[in-house]
């Protein structure tokens, strides 16, 4: 903050403590396993949900909608930022309710939330919410993706843990026809005073514009009924201070400033309301000062949440263990795990890198590394992946896939990794902060390659799990968590009992249980579990792949011991 002029600090929301509904994320020390952290970290930095579908791709490069008939070419980042604003502004500073809580998903039929951009945004976001990622967390992330994609400053650190409202909240989004007093009252509810209200609105209207299809009273429609006119607030689609400079130099075409109908010129009324003082402070701050100020303003907006909700800081993990699992492929029992490493974009990729996966036997005479440590090298390296957020951090990701054949008599207990770039520096050990990755799975395992989709509509699946012999089960089950089907529905959770499958003979120390599950596999996550007379074993939050005999198996590497 030291680089900002005192004037800018005064105007803006930088005096953050004075904004009451605003929550500062708390830091936590990450240790694996932490599925909620993993899920949020993946969505924020890789831009994807567990099955790899990308959210950030929809916005990266400051993309526009494809302009399907009657819908126009709205700027996606702008739509996502406006969505966050409309969710946030119905916070009520007087009683601590509302804020970024996803209530907007239940409020889209209100006139104050009019617009194709809102509907498209809710559809973008809906399929990424799941067991560990709330819609509200995605709404906040949307503003971060939007800023990062269009040349704004990134709003990190991000806090996750917002809780979704199950119904509509109060009304109160400002609309263009209102008076400055009404705007002031609307923003007071958010915890902002009149200068902060101007600041947030200018920052909002640095992106996007107004559509004739939604606001024909603001942007007159074209005579061609198939065409949607989308009038930008300034002359660039990027996030920059043009909205300010064009306003002050009189060239602005912002339809909320320059309009034949004075009823709809809400930006003009608001920007003039302090005699233009806020706009001049912004101009004096320059483009960079504007961006920093807006970053702080947006930070307040996305961290305004209902009282009682807390946020945990989601930092990028330098080394992340991805989906460790035991399964059967090609008749072999294998242990699969990926290690994701961050790569500094200014540094050369260490092509001579060796990464050693090390693990202890889980049982047998040499369990717990008593006289024996197993080791293996990675079998494949991924292409680098980048998103708007990692681009801004100057990082990309490489994932290294480990595939090793194991024996159930010894199985896999704790594991860890040693990364040696063979560049003269000493190797780095990634061992979960010293505790190693303590792998519990093997009493019950999921078998994507024995599971099959049974109908053409891809809605009915035979799901197969293996239960380790000699466990005597009293119940074997699978819980499925489907992506919500509409804005007002919650994600569906179902439990299915699996029974011993006589068609699959026991092998590799496992007996096989199966059952029919009807679910859309896209975005589906599952838990599997087995109860025995004296114990229960559970594996949670697995990606519900149904691979049958599809190709694409990575051959296992050799295991050595020391
Ligand atoms: C007095 C306050 C405000 C009024 C009356 C207002 C009104 C409007 C209207 C009528 C539109 C056109 C929407 C469309 O055609 O789909 C719009 C767009 C937009 N507003 Fe505001 N707004 C206000 C404050 C804000 C604030 C505080 C933010 C965010 C921080 C914001 C962010 C946006 C964005 C990003 C767009 C562009 C959306 C797009 O291109 O799809 N607005 N606003
Ligand atoms: C709004 O709040 C900021 C931060 O506390 C303050 O510096 C500024 O003077 C206030 N503006 C008005 C108009 O009260
Ligand atoms: C995280 O771990 C560090 C080092 O062990 C410790 O100093 C710090 O207090 C811990 N922070 C939290 C929030 O637990
Ligand atoms: C101006 O806009 C207002 C509010 O949308 C509308 O009621 C009115 O009819 C418009 N006036 C003209 C002349 O178009
Ligand atoms: C990447 O490396 C450069 C040069 O060593 C360094 O200045 C920068 O801080 C590094 N970036 C990250 C994100 O670690």
Image (cartoon, helix red, strand yellow):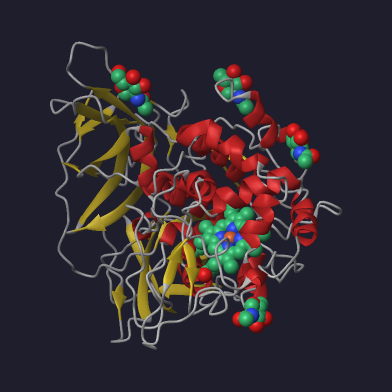
> Of 415 and 442, which appears nearest the observer?
415
Quarter that holds the N terminus = top right
Q: Quadrant of residue 163?
A: bottom right
Q: Which residue does the image show at 42% across and 40% down from the upper left?
A: 439
Location of residue 29 in the rendering, given as x and y in whole percent from the top left corner: 56, 30
Residue lying at the far right in this picture: please name it.
94
Location of residue 561 in the rendering, given as x and y in whole percent from the top left corner: 22, 27
Vertical placement of residue 502 versus 158, above or below: below
Q: Quadrant of residue 331?
A: bottom left
Q: Which residue does the image show at 48% across and 63% down from the upper left?
A: 209
Vertical placement of residue 486 versus 302, above or below: below
Q: Is residue 529 visible?
A: no
Quarter that holds the C terminus = top left
Vertical placement of residue 75 versus 246, above or below: below
> Of 389 and 457, which appears nearest the observer?
389
User: Is 185 on the left or on the right of 532, as rendered?
Assistant: right
Q: Can residue 243 be seen in this view?
A: yes
Q: Number of callouts in the render? A: 0
Location of residue 378 in the rendering, given as x and y in whole percent from the top left corner: 20, 37
Q: Which residue does the image show at 34% across and 46% down from the upper left?
A: 387
User: Is 149 on the left or on the right of 144, as rendered?
Assistant: left
Q: Quadrant of ligand 1?
A: bottom right
Q: Which residue does the image show at 69% across and 70% down from the upper left?
A: 177
Location of residue 438 in the rendering, given as x and y in whole percent from the top left corner: 45, 36
User: Is 247 on the left or on the right of 224, as rendered?
Assistant: right
User: Is 207 on the left or on the right of 264, as rendered?
Assistant: left
């Amino acid at each position: 903050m030291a680089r900002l002029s005192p004037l800018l600090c005064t105007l803006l929301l930088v005096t953050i403590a004075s904004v009451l509904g605003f929550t500062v994320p708390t830091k936590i020390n990450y240790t694996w396993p932490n599925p909620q952290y993993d899920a949020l970290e993946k969505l924020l930095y890789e831009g994807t949900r567990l099955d790899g579908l990308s959210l950030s791709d929809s916005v990266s490069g400051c993309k526009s909608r494809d302009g399907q008939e009657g819908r126009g070419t709205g700027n996606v980042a702008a739509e996502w930022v406006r969505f966050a604003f409309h969710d946030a502004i119905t916070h009520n500073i007087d009683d601590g309710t509302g804020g970024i809580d996803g209530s907007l998903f239940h409020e889209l039929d209100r006139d104050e939330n009019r617009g194709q951009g809102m509907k498209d945004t809710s559809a973008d976001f809906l399929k990424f919410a799941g067991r560990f990622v709330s819609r509200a967390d995605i709404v906040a992330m949307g503003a971060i993706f939007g800023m990062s994609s269009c040349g704004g400053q990134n709003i990190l650190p991000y806090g996750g843990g917002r809780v979704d409202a199950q119904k509509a909240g109060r009304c109160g989004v400002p609309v263009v026809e209102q008076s400055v007093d009404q705007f002031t009252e609307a923003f007071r509810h958010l915890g902002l005073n009149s200068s902060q209200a101007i600041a947030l609105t200018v920052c909002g209207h640095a992106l996007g514009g107004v559509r004739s299809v939604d606001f024909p009273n603001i942007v007159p429609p074209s005579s061609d009924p198939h065409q949607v006119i989308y009038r930008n607030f300034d002359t660039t689609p990027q996030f920059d201070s043009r909205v300010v400079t064009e306003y002050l130099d009189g060239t602005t075409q912002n339809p909320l400033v320059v309009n034949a109908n004075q009823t709809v010129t809400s930006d003009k009324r608001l920007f003039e309301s302090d005699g233009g003082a806020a706009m001049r402070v912004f101009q004096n701050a320059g483009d960079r000062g504007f961006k920093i100020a807006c970053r702080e303003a947006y930070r307040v907006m996305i961290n305004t949440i209902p009282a009682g909700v807390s946020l945990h800081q989601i930092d990028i993990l330098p080394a992340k263990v991805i989906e460790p699992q035991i399964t059967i492929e090609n008749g072999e029992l294998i242990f699969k795990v990926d290690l994701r490493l961050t790569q500094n974009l200014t540094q050369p990729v260490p092509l001579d890198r060796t990464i050693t996966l090390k693990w202890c036997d889980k049982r047998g005479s040499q369990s717990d590394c008593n006289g024996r440590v197993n080791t293996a090298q990675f079998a494949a390296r991924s292409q680098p992946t980048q998103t708007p957020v990692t681009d801004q951090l100057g990082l990309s990701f490489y994932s290294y896939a480990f595939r090793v054949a194991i024996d159930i008599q010894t199985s896999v207990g704790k594991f860890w990794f040693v990364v040696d770039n063979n560049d003269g520096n000493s190797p780095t050990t990634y061992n979960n902060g010293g505790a190693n990755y303590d792998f519990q799975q093997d009493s019950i395992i999921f078998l994507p390659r024995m599971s099959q989709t049974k109908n053409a509509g891809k809605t009915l699946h035979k799901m197969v799990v293996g239960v380790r012999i000699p466990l005597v089960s009293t119940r074997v089950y699978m819980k499925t968590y489907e992506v919500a089907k509409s804005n007002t529905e919650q994600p569906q959770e179902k439990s299915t009992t699996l029974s011993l499958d006589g068609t699959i003979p026991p092998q590799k120390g496992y007996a096989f249980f199966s059952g029919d599950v009807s679910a859309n596999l896209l975005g589906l996550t599952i838990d599997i579990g087995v109860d025995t007379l004296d114990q229960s074993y559970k594996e949670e939050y697995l990606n519900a792949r149904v691979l049958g005999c599809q190709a694409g198996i990575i051959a296992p590497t050799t295991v050595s011991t020391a």
